[in-house]
Amino acid sequence: MMKQALASAGALALAGCATLPAANDMADRSYAPDCAAIGSFLDSAVAQGRTVGASALVWKDGREVCFDSAGLASREDERPFARDTLVQIFSMTKPVTGIALMQLWEQGKFGLDDPLYWHLPEYKDLKVATGLGPDGQPVLRDPLRPPTVRDVLRHTAGFTYGGSEEPADVVWAQLQPLSPDNTLAQFSQKMAQVPLLADPGTRWIYSASVDVQARLVEVLSGMAFDDYVAANIFTPLAMTDSAWKRESGDLDRLARIYVADESGALQPMPREIWLEPNFAGKPMTMGGAGIVTTVDDYMRFARMLLNEGELDGQRIVQPETIRLMSTDMLDPRIPTENRMWLPGKGSGGFGLDFFVRTAPPATAEENRGTVGEFFWDGFPSMLFWVDPAQDMAVVFATQKVPFDNALHHGFRDAVYGADYAGIPPE
């Protein structure tokens, strides 16, 4: 187990307090992350069998302030979870895709409120599924309006991710749009045949819309999606360890994914699943998942976001674009029950490919964070966030499924302290 705490500050308050501070004490004006608490959390998470290995990196006030790691990247090989360990980040790919598409928006390639079919004609005749007919196929009607590109960026287009009991997913199961054997072009043609779950703009539905974004990047740029991202994000940001497709030699650095069984014990994911599609030569390059990277590489992406679109002299997007993406864009008329599990992320809403915190934590059970932060996470319990008010970016890496929000709660407590109020400093 490796220890590298580069700086440490005292704990903010007594750990384990069950109530929040009074309102007049809520402004967090002198916050500093407690590196010792972060290291202790990682150690305890491994020791308690909550994960096999993990690392954490904190950047604040223009410098790295904490790095630590614990446990193993591969228990079977007794290989430590090290700083250069490669991880599969799954849905933490989505913000990268969003930035790629918004670069093209800045170039005037599309308007946010353009109907999607203006740029991808296969989506012109979308239907909404309202039930199942006697033949077991969905009953369809026209949507109240076509989905816009903005809908695609904020998960309000009505698209599905498959796997639910809703009528539209009968067609998803038949067509399998996200099969790794499809190209993005083939995905999009099949996705356009899957009915919508709801009228655009009426529900927040986590979906394959970010893969639609990736196809938009291809069509608007004239480049393969992964080539575009490599040329316009990874290369200028010097993210030399980030890619969708990897070589077999990278397996020596790749963390294994572990699955919690019914008893909570962590079992290695079968190799044929664990390595798909990144190491298997499949044609699919998803916009919503698939990047393999390191904590240092992803921190470079997070630092670019924190610095409003620029890093080390490389301008990726304009500051106004980051501000737009990190602003809650969900219509207040979309009730909580129509936002799936999004409210479980905290007090906030959704911008363009980011959760956005709009209010301080309401209870001690809610994950700590600061008003104005924006973030996303990934299925194997990966997490990153950008906290502009504290001039801070954080990357937490682990490879444990199913997704473990309790792990994130404990990690955020370690970073902020259990009593952190979440009010930006004046």
Image: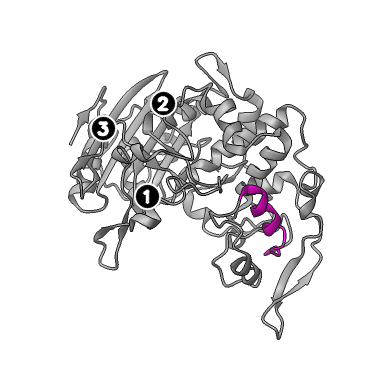
- The residue located at (29%, 39%) in the rendering is 252
Sequence-wise first label, 2 or 1: 2
Indicate the position of residue 62 as horizontal and vertical percent values. Answer: 42, 18
Mark drawn on residue 29: 2
Residue at label 1? 364
Query: Is residue 195 inside the magenta stretch?
Result: yes
Disc 2 + disc 3, Cβ < 8 Å? no
Along the line of sight, which residue is nearer the eye, 166 or 233?
233
Circle 3: residue type = Asp
Circle 2: residue type = Arg
Q: Quadrant of the N terminus?
A: top left
Mark drawn on residue 12: none
Q: CA distance from mark 2 to mark 3?
A: 25 Å
Q: Secondary structure at mark 3?
A: strand
- From the viewer's perspective, is the residue at label 3 or at label 1 nearer? 3
Q: Secondary structure at mark 2?
A: loop
Q: Secondary structure at mark 1?
A: loop
Against 324, residue 54 (above or below) is: below
Q: CA distance from mark 2 to mark 1?
A: 20 Å
- Name the side, left or right, on which 270 lies relative to 308: left
In this view, the residue farthest toward the bottom is 134
| Category of crowding for the residue at label 1, using alpha-carbon neighbours closer than 10 angstroms: few (below 14), some (14–19), many (at least 20) | some
Residue at label 3? 68
- Name the side, left or right, on which 43 lies relative to 361: left
- From the viewer's perspective, is the residue at label 2 or at label 3 nearer? 3
- The residue located at (45%, 45%) in the rendering is 278
- The residue located at (41%, 50%) in the rendering is 366
Highlighted magenta segment, given as a residue range: 183-197
Indicate the position of residue 229 as horizontal and vertical percent values. Answer: 57, 32
Q: CA distance from mark 3 to mark 1?
A: 26 Å
